[in-house]
Amino acid sequence: MWSVVWAAVRSKAPYVTFPVAFVVGLVGYHLEWFLRGDPQPTAEEEKSISERREDRKLQEIAGKDLTKVVSLKDKLEFAPRAVLNRNRPEKS
């Protein structure tokens, strides 16, 4: 008799486990929300990711002189590296 009961429990386990897990998760979510309360968003959290990225880039270039740029003739690293550097002249 026990083998029939265990076989029935094994075959119906997903149908029982999912609703129980759903209810436990739902109760836990609402309990945590109730205990923590609704946090007030700060000014930093209200900004989108793109706005934060733009602000960071502006802060990075704020103290730099953007008119002084290295010439492409002086800069040898603008071309991609060839395989094993076979096609590139040696730097002097």
Image: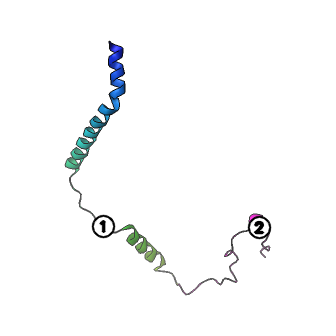
The residue wearing badge 2 is 85
Q: Could you tell me residue 63's position as x and y percent?
A: 48, 80
At a point 29% along the width and 31% down the height, the residue shown is 16
Q: Is residue 1 magenta?
A: no
The secondary structure type at the circle numbered 2 is helix
Q: Which mark is residue 46?
A: 1
At a point 21% along the width and 44% down the height, the residue shown is 31
The quadrant of the rendering that contains the N terminus is: top left
Q: Which mark is residue 81?
A: none
Name which quarter of the figure residue 68 lies in.
Answer: bottom right
- Asked if 27 appears above or below 88 in the picture, the reply is above
Question: Horizontal placement of 31 versus 79: left or right?
Answer: left
Question: Horizontal placement of 69 versus 34: left or right?
Answer: right
Asked if the residue under mark 1 is in contact with the one under mark 2, i.e. CB atoms within 8 Å, the reply is no
Residue projecting furthest to the top: 1
- Of the residues shown, which amino acid type is indicated by label 2? Asn
Magenta region: which residues?
66-92
What crowding class fits label 1: few (fewer than 14 Cα within 10 Å), some (14-19), or many (20 or more)?
Answer: few
Q: Could you tell me residue 65's position as x and y percent?
A: 52, 84
The secondary structure type at the circle numbered 1 is helix
How many numbered circles does the render carry?
A: 2
- Asked if 71 appears above or below 34 in the picture, the reply is below
At a point 70% along the width and 77% down the height, the residue shown is 76
